[in-house]
Amino acid sequence: MYDAIIVGARVAGSATALLIARRSYRVLLVDRASFPSDTLSTHLIQLPGGAALKRWGLLDKVIATDPGKAAQVRFDMEELAVVGQYPFLDGVNAVYSPRRYVLDTILLAEAAEAGVEVRQEFTVQELLWENGRVVGIRGRTKTGESVIECARIVIGADGRYSLIARTVAAPTYHEHPSLTCGYYSYWSDVPTQGGEIYLRGKRFISLWPTNDHLTLIYTAWPAAEFSVFRADIERNFLETLDLVPALAARVRQGQRAERFRGSAEMANFYRKPFGPGWALVGDAGYQKDPITAMGISDAFRDAELLAAALDDGFAGRRPLAAALAHYEQRRNAASRPFYEFTLETAQMKPLTVGQRELLQALPRHPTAASQFFGVLTGVVQPATFFRLQNLFQILGVQGLTKMVLNTVFQPRQKGERSGILLPSGRKGATHHK
């Protein structure tokens, strides 16, 4: 009898298993894949994720694989460019982009070191129920043997198409359909000086250094254009880069090292992450568009929250159901501002006059630019950065007055964002039931 069985051994599952096992609980971690192996991913470990790895004693192990380091970032929107440094968070001020076969294997090995029983190439076939409560799993080993295992809780860390979530019929809320589609690959001999983000009309491009001295290049289009993009991926990918001629020339001097990967199935939703005998973590419980690349860091945060909740319940400090309800509340409170920010960003709407004023001012204010990049990496709350007092400090009274007057009195073009701010999670935030 295990304290927890976790289905899915990638970033959310291995991190959760590690943190539960370090609290001296008995954990079984299963995955149908074998490791090391790759998976579709945004790669980026944003600053909160790096700080989590540091707390767990794993950041140095990740850095030792030479995953590429981005302490500086270029944000270039409609040819208005801001270049600056990320702020520090618990001693971490760089975004890392390890390949998933590297990162997942480190986490899995650390979980095993902490005492987690790991079974690779294990296929979960069904959940076991008793009196309306999940009590275990039935699965098949890589040799075909049928196995039953029981636990106090079964955790789904098995991604957006989670078998656990489907089986327990976990309710969804705050739903929004896919906004973008995207493809990425890796290039050799395309050096970067940190991270690079470009937005040209309805086209998004980002570049990040990763393992083996390769550069990850990602492009996104509106989801409605997926069939066009997919019809000729390479041509459309390169034509997207051509919207930034200097970048396109740099990429063409290098060489693509691997095939393209991508998807249009990027729905945005929350799932209720717990019920009698079960819980969800990572993409199984909360999914948003990858354009802000916060998935890995969010998975680490939720792993910590879930492990703490389970410890409270198992140790009797509060009823397990109450502890898991608190997990959901804390997850939602931490994620919702950036969920709204992501939905706004993924719509790739034209800049308003006010937003142009702000982007033009940021290069003159390095501290404010660092705060802006703090929003992009999930450190600074959007509502904090975009409050009027902060805008006043950046723009001054004349600039802020001009921004407000232009926004109030100048008619908006079709498709322009309402309000004077960049996506903020405040003004114009969307709320979906």
Image: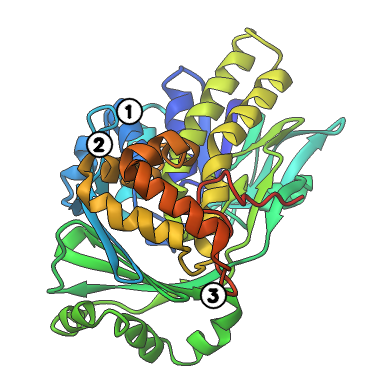
Dot 2 amino acid type: Leu
Question: What element does badge 1 sit on?
Answer: loop
Dot 1 amino acid type: Trp
Residue 143 at x, y percent in the picture: 52, 57
Question: Mark 3 to mark 2: distance in Å?
Answer: 35 Å
As drawn, the label of residue 361 is none
Above or below for 147 versus 332:
below
Quadrant hosting residue 73: bottom left
Which residue is label 1 attached to?
Answer: 56
Camera-nearest label, 3 or 2? 3
Q: Residue at x 19, y 36 (%)?
A: 60
Quadrant hosting residue 75: bottom left
Residue 83 at x, y percent in the picture: 21, 55
Q: How is the image coloured?
A: rainbow
Above or below for 338 versus 348:
above
Instruction: Name which of mark 1 and mark 3 comes first in the sequence.
Output: 1
What is the crowding at mark 1: few (fewer than 14 residues within 10 Å), some, or many (at least 20)? few
As drawn, the label of residue 222 is 3
Residue 41 at x, y percent in the picture: 42, 60
Question: What element does badge 2 sit on?
Answer: helix
Q: Is residue 201 left or right of residue 394?
A: right
Q: Residue at x 19, y 66 (%)?
A: 214
Above or below for 358 versus 24:
below
Instruction: Name which of mark 3 and mark 2 comes first in the sequence.
Output: 2
Which residue is label 2 attached to?
Answer: 59
